[in-house]
Image (cartoon, rainbow, N blue to C red):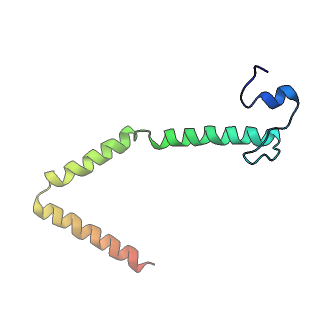
Amino acid sequence: MGVHGNHLWQLEGRVPKGPRGEQRSADAIGCAGTAAKLWVWLEAEEQRRPSGRVRSGQAGAKVRPAKLTPAERQEVARSAEGMRRRSWENH
């Protein structure tokens, strides 16, 4: 028998075996392969770079405080604090 690997059961008419020797249906084997492909795809999605909008927004968030005067930064901070306080009071 020159055939190796998981396809041997197809040629001999046997049911595939699990890691402990239990019989598995072909559907279980197919589902395992699909799950592995999905896992690889999800890993690739996590490593994808952020979009241009996201990168641009992050860059702007770093530059904006540098351009503001201390008085303007203080005004922005007070405004944000007031918004947080009003939001907290509504809960």
* Quadrant location of the N terminus in the rendered image: top right
Q: Position of residue 64 (x, y in %)?
A: 20, 51
Q: Nearer the viewer, residue 5 or 71?
A: 5
Instruction: Examine the image and state in which quarter residue 32 appears.
Output: top right
Residue at screen point 75% across, 48% down: 20
Query: Could you say where residue 87 lies in the image, as x and y percent from the top left?
Result: 39, 73
> Would you place residue 2 above or below residue 76 in this image?
above
Task: Give the image quarter of residue 28.
Answer: top right
Q: Residue at the location (75% across, 39% down)?
A: 29
Q: How many marks?
A: 0
Residue 45, compared with residue 64, is above or below; it is above
How far from the left and from the top, in percent, is residue 35? 66, 42
Q: Is residue 63 left or right of residue 26?
A: left
**In the displayed structure image, the side of residue 90 where residue 56 appears, left or right:** left
Query: Where does residue 78 sit, x and y in percent of width and height?
Result: 23, 70
Q: Residue at x 34, y 72 (%)?
A: 84
Q: In the rendered image, which quarter contains the C terminus? A: bottom left
Seen from this angle, which residue lies furthest right? 13
When the figure is inspected, residue 62 is found, relative to residue 29, above or below; the finding is below
Q: Residue at x 19, y 66 (%)?
A: 75
